[in-house]
């Protein structure tokens, strides 16, 4: 990877930058997702694991929030949550400020399952990044910090209905 040289190329347009993002981010995302799935354990389906990951990133989310993210109906997601609850991976509880709303949280076992996969994925990615020079790794970290600043954190979870 050649680091960008401001002396030989003083600027990149926003369109060129956007094109690089559109072309590169899916490659990185695909690699991360493949590693996460590889380390999820054979006892979880991909949608179940994605559900754990979403709840892990959004503790207290509603059934609607996770269903919208995963792309399932509330009824289907409710059945999946019931199965995850029976396996002691997820708990359902009433929202403290609205008894009609159900909040989802990972149990200690659910959190451990999700974090184990994240740790294994980070280890694998780190192994892939060892071939880069220290300067290239610094450039990547700086780029990630810049992207986080530009795009912010994940959008707030939209809570719809009672779910």
Image: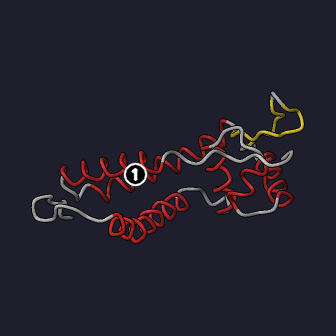
Q: Position of residue 88 (x, y in %)?
A: 75, 42
Q: Is residue 111 above or below residue 49?
A: above
Residue depicted at x 84% and y 56%: 79
- Please tell me which residue lies in front, 7 or 76: 7
Q: Which residue in the structure is indicated by mark 1? A: 147
Q: Position of residue 16 (x, y in %)?
A: 33, 69
Residue depicted at x 18% and y 54%: 133
Q: Position of residue 41 (x, y in %)?
A: 60, 56
Horizontal side of 139 relative to 146 (left or right) equals left
Q: Is residue 96 above or below residue 39?
A: above
Q: Residue furthest right?
A: 100
Residue depicted at x 26% and y 64%: 12
**On-image quarter of the N terminus:** bottom left
Q: Position of residue 97 (x, y in %)?
A: 81, 28
Residue neighbourhood size for the residue with mark 1, other residues' Cα within 10 Å, grouped as few (<14), some (14–19), many (≥20) = few
Helix, strand or loop at mark 1: helix
């Amino acid at each position: 990877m050649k680091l960008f040289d401001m002396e030989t190329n003083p600027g990149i347009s926003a369109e060129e930058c956007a094109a690089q993002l559109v072309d590169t981010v899916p490659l990185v995302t695909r690699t991360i997702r493949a590693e996460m799935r590889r380390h999820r354990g054979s006892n979880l389906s991909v949608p179940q694991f994605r559900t754990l990951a979403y709840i892990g990133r959004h503790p207290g989310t509603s059934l609607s929030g996770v269903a919208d993210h995963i792309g399932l109906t509330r009824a289907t997601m409710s059945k999946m949550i019931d199965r995850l609850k029976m396996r002691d991976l997820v708990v359902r509880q009433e929202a403290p400020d609205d008894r009609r709303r159900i909040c989802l949280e990972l149990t200690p076992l659910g959190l451990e399952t999700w974090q184990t996969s994240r740790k294994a994925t980070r280890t694998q990615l780190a192994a892939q990044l060892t071939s880069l020079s220290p300067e290239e790794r610094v450039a990547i970290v700086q780029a990630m910090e810049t992207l986080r600043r530009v795009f912010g954190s994940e959008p707030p979870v939209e809570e719809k209905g009672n779910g």
